[in-house]
Image (cartoon, coloured by chain):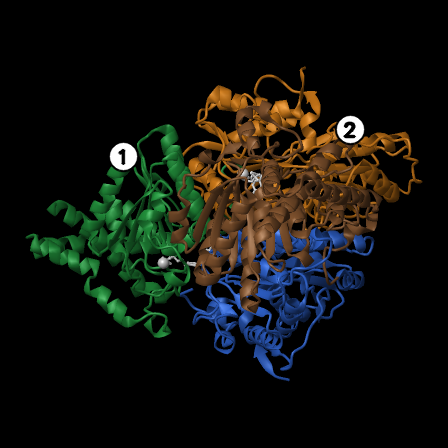
Chain colours: A blue, B orange, C brown, D green
Amino acid sequence: MRMITYCDAINEALIQEMERDPSVFIYGIGVPDHKKIFGTTKGILEKFGPARCFDTPIAEDSMTGLALGAAINGLRPIHVHIRVDFLLLAMNQIANLISSFSYGCGGAAGAPLVIRAIVGRGWGQGFQHSKSMHGTFAKIPGLKVICPTTPEDAKGLMITAIRDNDPVLVFEHRWLYWQTGEVAKDSFTIPLGRGRVVKEGKDLTIVATSWMNVEALHAARILERHGVDVEIIDPRSIVPLDEEIIVNSVNKTGRCLVADNDWTYCGFSAEVAALVSSRCFGRLHAPVERLGFAQTPCPTVRRLENVFYPNAEKIVRRVEKMTGLAPIDLSGEVFYSHENRFKGPF
Amino acid sequence: MRMITYCDAINEALIQEMERDPSVFIYGIGVPDHKKIFGTTKGILEKFGPARCFDTPIAEDSMTGLALGAAINGLRPIHVHIRVDFLLLAMNQIANLISSFSYGCGGAAGAPLVIRAIVGRGWGQGFQHSKSMHGTFAKIPGLKVICPTTPEDAKGLMITAIRDNDPVLVFEHRWLYWQTGEVAKDSFTIPLGRGRVVKEGKDLTIVATSWMNVEALHAARILERHGVDVEIIDPRSIVPLDEEIIVNSVNKTGRCLVADNDWTYCGFSAEVAALVSSRCFGRLHAPVERLGFAQTPCPTVRRLENVFYPNAEKIVRRVEKMTGLAPIDLSGEVFYSHENRFKGPF
Amino acid sequence: MKHLSIELYKKMFLIRSAELQIQEIYAQDEMKTPMHMSMGEEAIVAGVVGALNAEDQVLGTYRSHALYLAKTGDTERFYAEMFGKVGGCARGKAGSMHLSALGQGLLCCSAIVASGIPVAMGAAFANKYKNNGKRVAVFFGDGAMDEGVFWETINFCGLHKLPILFICEDNGFAVHTRREKRQRFSSDHQLFENFGIKAFEENTTDPEIIYNTTRNALNHLQTTGQPCFLRFHYYRYLEHVGINEDFDAGYRDREEFLAWREKDPLRMQRQKLLGQGVSLALIEALEHEINAKVEAGIRFARQSSFPAECETYQGVFQCA
Amino acid sequence: MKHLSIELYKKMFLIRSAELQIQEIYAQDEMKTPMHMSMGEEAIVAGVVGALNAEDQVLGTYRSHALYLAKTGDTERFYAEMFGKVGGCARGKAGSMHLSALGQGLLCCSAIVASGIPVAMGAAFANKYKNNGKRVAVFFGDGAMDEGVFWETINFCGLHKLPILFICEDNGFAVHTRREKRQRFSSDHQLFENFGIKAFEENTTDPEIIYNTTRNALNHLQTTGQPCFLRFHYYRYLEHVGINEDFDAGYRDREEFLAWREKDPLRMQRQKLLGQGVSLALIEALEHEINAKVEAGIRFARQSSFPAECETYQGVFQCA
Ligand SMILES: Cc1ncc(C[n+]2csc(CCOP(=O)(O)OP(=O)(O)O)c2C)c(N)n1
Ligand SMILES: Cc1ncc(C[n+]2csc(CCOP(=O)(O)OP(=O)(O)O)c2C)c(N)n1
Ligand SMILES: [Mg+2]
Ligand SMILES: [Mg+2]
């Protein structure tokens, strides 16, 4: 099968859905400009014109209301935010209106809209351009929240999100945009609420979200060489959550580390830890552990950023502790650094 | 000692601090009007005048920015919201600016401001006037979050919050306003980050927030008559959290139920469950359980509202399951119903 | 002309009659939902909705009894919602503050001030996108203009010439706070002009004036593509929320109220009809019919059942 | 007069020189922070800040190199912050987008569009509360006026007559999107009048005109209590973020740039000084001194150490 990037997979999903369904449109700050949202919106303006692909004022609150109103009237809006942090300006529309639209009319109709929010580390972006927050939105009943990791998932889940009759928030980690993978050319869907076994293993389960799957896989390769066989589960969708795939895995391995691309306190990692601790009670050999952002605003300088963000090295170190493995010499190991691919300027 | 209501305790705290420190001022929609925010702001306009106690336009976003700017310039604003749901309009200021102000200037200065948000059930308020969300804000590093339950805590924690050099969000459950308790007349403080043992017990720990402490205590009295001796812990402050008081209690009882006044998914109850499951690993006789809002928007009709909200009866039922107790006949029991105190209209 | 006068009177009478019944029975605590009464604003809603086509769409706030009744004419789903019954427009889940009737063009009522305004913009955007000729009228109080989202919305609507009317039902108060305490801006015409929006203003309890103003606005929209802002002044008869008067609270004068009640839209319109030669008998027959409809609505509501407990969990998502 | 011309030139030269150095060394990747360059706007910032008193306070955006340098005159803490060093104004935690100098009146720079505007209102509120005579000037781009919070803020400031200047640095673009695509409103004077705010506008690269406009605004504020809105047009020389030109991107023309660069504020002001009889030697001496200061700043930054890893966890709270 074809290998394409995550970025191209999203682009393909958008174009195929816009071809299929004239009620789909895409908009947001910068959506049609030459940068094309990291390339994910390329060709769309050219193909579908400015009525279905347009820029907006910097007015997140009202532009989110626009999505809801358009959805109520039968369109399928896709609203794009180049940083999830900007979604906080639209919190009222999302949490007070969109999330309860279906419920609030007794289920008579839904609000089929997609909000794409880009997350992930950049070039010293600091505390206002670094959040992730899928857990924050997942907490609000009435919102679906997904974090695709592979190009295939990006395409299949995006298409499902667009066709879904409920509001779906899609969190895309920018470092994933350049990851490649096999993706079918034709349109296909992947159901929400089904996790994926990224790698099978028997000693310990890592539940990883978004980019943390890449880090977990790297960590697993290292650990494998030292006799620890890790299983990696990517829930893919945060709401609805595939509890079974997580519980089954931990019941098998008896150990669980949650590696989340977000703050841990009151976050999704807390939910998974609570879930696993409860449903795998008596089958755990050790407490569930969590890795995520440091509980601080995100610092700018690289050295502190490296402390702030979780990565493969930290996963290895944590797994060592959880399994009683002696510290591995990681001095020869080259960990992923976006710098190697993407130099400043931001 | 004097018995006063929670409402009067807050009022006293505000007045004493405003007398002590001329840089304290209080404002928000309806703050000086004749309803006086359920009575909590009574006498303040009269005593301190409109420069220090004023109403605002309905403009939560900018009015929250006002607090930050005033705090930077040395004042101590108290911003009041009659429903926490309205704080969602100010999410950007809170999560993107206020929370990172201290960190963002390298710790050079803080943002000493208080945001009071009222939560709790009313007269069929529905999904836009029913949220709680202390867990949502607690997730953001840089914010302190407290949920006082007793009149004494309301006064002591409020005074601490006002004097604190960091932003503090105070969640006040409206049903608590009419609860009475002993409160010292003179000014006093209660440190943030220290929980309170509401009731000692040996069989099971209930970690309860805000109004859920009242329900837990009621449940505990019922359970006591049936031989189950419950310990109740009120963390009082969600950030910073007194982990030790919780862990010590559960290490003693071996069982833990978290009864939170919020949604459970990715909420504070998940954090406590994760914490307890991890730190009390091997000492738990049963999985940690959680009670909170149903994972739905809040319905209006009373019958469904009763399903949506946790209460003493649900605590009893859950504890029965956790301890293997036979179902108690609760038919004679009168559970708290605000209706008995407060009839419509809302 | 006479026909219009009668139609508007009927709409207003339905609203007033329905709310009088709420006042009558609210104390029985069957309707456990906070009531933000429309009493006093009947002429505005009747006039605007009367001027719209049936396919046109409206959005409102927590204070939308009048809007629901004028747009749908229904009393059964209305009261059943107040009673929290499955027969209600939202199966009892929404209550008084969140009425809707998607099939009849009442798209959404939000209890967060101003938050329905951008949603209305989205609805208007969709209508333009589909080129279906429908117009959207969004109702809000003067308080909504305090919120930034109002300004964002008029800017975008002006920029994109969306088919929308902004209907400001101005009672001069947000809860107990006077407009002058909240808003520095005043001159609508000049202000909205700047945003590409044509402003209209009326201070009247005559629904026909409001009807005509709305028709003018719709014509303006039709010919120029410019959205319109319509400010209609009225007096809120009752307390902000609840079914009682509140002149003892001290924030406003009973005198003010009495002056407005002199011009009560219902009484004035009834007089007008009589003046136009409509017989008292006909008027009373209409009133009787409407009262019967209101009573039937309440009966329906009482007979409808409460939702089953499991309904708490239903309707959160369309695709589970 | 001559003195003022020199002072303004010095401020501008410091900004330009400091940014030329950033362009020079950014490729070495020592400054791992996104650079939103001020190049082109020097006259605005120098003119406005020059007109303020030292005790007056300013707030800015992610594009605040100029503002920081003009307000503080410091280069050491400036560059150290760019390099992420403990000597930086925020110990390396904030980077280019979040400069601050509380002691010198730069209160906050926020990278969320428009979000500093209400914070500035709060600062002005506090100054009025304390009656300390300080004024606040908040700098923002034309894009900030897209956001509702801008309108909320001017309403409140107009209502309460807060001592504040709104400084719109209008480059006609938000990232790559022209103002006409985002904003329907145009006539400042009429529009802001309605909010109780006096509007000023200049399209110039002459810092003295900007200085004088600002003085006029401050006088107006002083005498009437009315806040002022000042719109200054300029051309952003470089890409939205980054140190390079971007005329190949196609969203704007190099010709436009060349026309503006004809009037480059630095070159024009230098010519003016020469015309006023300031000797070339003096000018070169000043420039030399400033360049040396810039170099010293970079040296300081290089020598300053990175924060220790444990600093990640410090400064989140003042009271732990
Ligand atoms: C965002 C928000 N803030 C505060 C409130 C509380 N609140 C409910 S109604 C209201 C006043 C609204 O006044 P107006 O828009 O003039 O409508 P009216 O009640 O006069 O019809 C306020 C402040 C709210 N519902 N939403
Ligand atoms: C609320 C918000 N939305 C979007 C962005 C992304 N963004 C960064 S700068 C910018 C353009 C701002 O334009 P303007 O205010 O004119 O300032 P300029 O860059 O032209 O100086 C945008 C949209 C942001 N930072 N904040
Ligand atoms: Mg009003
Ligand atoms: Mg600009």
> What kind of residue is marked 2?
Asn
Distance (Cα) linking label 2 and label 1: 58 Å
| Secondary structure of residue under mark 1 | helix
Res B246 quadrant in image: top right
Nearest to the observer: residue B303 or residue D191: D191
Residue A332: in sight, yes or no?
no
- In the image, residue A179 above or below residue D151: below
Category of crowding for the residue at label 2, using alpha-carbon neighbours closer than 10 angstroms: few (below 14), some (14–19), many (at least 20): few
Residue B340 numbered tag: 2
Distance from mark 2 CB to nearest ligand 1 atom below 8 Å: no
> What kind of residue is marked 1?
Gln
| Secondary structure of residue under mark 2 | helix
Q: Quadrant of ligand 4?
A: bottom left
Res B150 quadrant in image: top right
Res B13 quadrant in image: top right
Residue A80 numbered tag: none
Nearest to the observer: residue D120 or residue D308: D120
Q: Are marks 2 and 1 in contact (CB under 8 Å)?
A: no
- The answer to whether residue D228 is left or right of residue C59 is left
Residue annotated with mark 1: D222
Category of crowding for the residue at label 1, using alpha-carbon neighbours closer than 10 angstroms: few (below 14), some (14–19), many (at least 20): some
Q: Position of residue C315 (x, y in %)?
A: 74, 55
- The answer to whether residue B22 is left or right of residue A230 is left
Q: Position of residue B232 (x, y in %)?
A: 76, 34
- In the picture, which quadrant includes the C terminus of chain C? bottom right
- In the image, residue C59 above or below residue B158: below
Q: Position of residue D156 (x, y in %)?
A: 42, 39
Chain of the residue displaying label 2: B
Chain of the residue displaying label 1: D
Q: Position of residue B280 (x, y in %)?
A: 75, 45
- Residue at 60 percent across and 35 percent down: it is B82
